[in-house]
Image: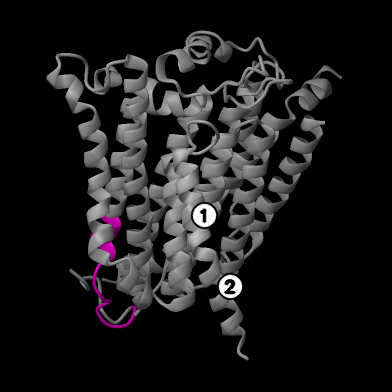
Amino acid sequence: MTQLVIMVLLTLLAAVTVGVIYTRNLVGVVVLAGVYSFLMASVLIALDAVDVAMTEASVGAGVSTVVLIATVYLTKSTEYPRPRKALLPLAVAVGTGAAIVWGTYGLRPFGAPDAAIHTHVVPRYLADSVKDTLVPNVVTSVLADYRGYDTLGETTVIFTAGIGVMLLLRGRRRGRPGAGGAGGGA
Amino acid sequence: MQLLSGLVGHYNYVVAIFLMVAGLYIVVARGNMIKKLVGLSLFQTSVYLLYIAPGKIVGGTAPILDPAFTVYSNPLPHVLILTAIVVGVATLALGLALVARISEAYGTVEEDEIFAKEDQE
Amino acid sequence: MRLDDILRIVIKLLLPFILLFALYVQFHGDFGPGGGFQAGVIAAGMVILYALVFGVRAAKRVVPQSMTAAMVPLGVLIYASAGLPALFMGRNYLDYGVLARDPAFGHEIGIFMIEAGVLVTVSGTMTVIFYAFADRGR
């Protein structure tokens, strides 16, 4: 049953992606990207990844959509149709996809409990989380305690992004778009 | 026949790779910079799916320890993808800030027109 | 009656519950899905919603630019300093066991502190990014 739900949601995701490829109105593209994020959050819940689903829904369908709409408002554009057919990128994309699909035949079928990633450290995390940290949510205890260094790096990345956007976009625009020239703005 | 039954068992992976390839196609084949960034974001999200799907155990539950359950899905991919999602949105915000500044400098966000303007100077 | 009025009244009623939900997700991240990142984004979403309905200027009176710009590095500082007591005790950096007499409780205190740091940084950054994009267009 879960597998059927996941298959239906994935088919909807593929349809939304084809819509993003062919839509030229940028506001429509942004709305479809938000729909994509919500569908992905639903698929992640069906895959038992509840923390990840909450993060994907709030970050992907929340912050990403806001920032994209703000940029579309600042640039006021619609996509132009390309003058030539994009055959080489299509060939590269199809070739890469076929190679990776051939590679996934080495994976265990969906939901198998004997895959390689269920060995090594994970049984230890599941067994020792409450004993070591008194926290039942294993994802939080692994993120914050067993793998705390990575989370420190991630927080620094968010900090860097905030600083970068502040440096790029602080202050008013210097003149109308295009009238300022390549050197406009400090 | 073997190929077909393998396809049904691996439907999740095949669709995740289709989404990945579609995102890659948008990045490479489209000239509008905002659409390229949207394609990049779709690409990243499909990689999350490809990463988390092998961690699911049929009959398991979310990895929150509770005396009522014995089988849990694998929490390790969840942790790594949590970091990846946040880094992805940081990249998207910075990229869009750069696109906003480019559009102020050149008046457009289509890469063909920007190359043409650069060639003229 | 303008359609604006419905939106403003409903959003005014809704905003405290959004903040409450963000704090709930933050503090119950130990026992259910949640944690610092999700809570930070929901809290920033509250500020963005207020700015969308009432204007960026009104939002800046409630949540000033200087405060959000200070929150961005403050969270990283809280995180990094949660690991320092272990260094002074001669153990590894980010070893939370020294924060309390019982090592397991020390780990729980350490997780609480760093999740608070992550909440501060993430909500500050998302608000700063929104303010930067919104100000550029005026």
Quarter assignment of residue B45: top right
Q: Which residue is mark 2?
A: C10
Marks 2 and 1: CB-CB under 8 Å?
no
Q: Which residue is mark 1?
A: B38
Q: Amino acid at mark 2?
A: Val
Task: Give the camera-side residue of A73 and C5.
Answer: C5
Crowd around label 1: few <14 · some 14–19 · many ≥20 (10 Å): many
Would you say residue A64 is visible in this rendering?
no
Q: Amino acid at mark 1?
A: Val
Q: Position of residue C113 (x, y in %)?
A: 31, 35
Q: Quadrant of the C terminus of chain A?
A: bottom left
The chain holding disc 2 is C
> Furthest-bottom residue in view?
C1
Q: Secondary structure at mark 1?
A: helix
Residue at figure coordinates x 42%, y 28% from the top left = A143
Q: Position of residue C132 (x, y in %)?
A: 32, 66
Crowd around label 2: few <14 · some 14–19 · many ≥20 (10 Å): few
Q: Quadrant of the N terminus of chain A?
A: top right
Q: CA distance from mark 2 to mark 1?
A: 32 Å
Residue at figure coordinates x 23%, y 47% from the top left = C74
The image's mark for residue C138 is none
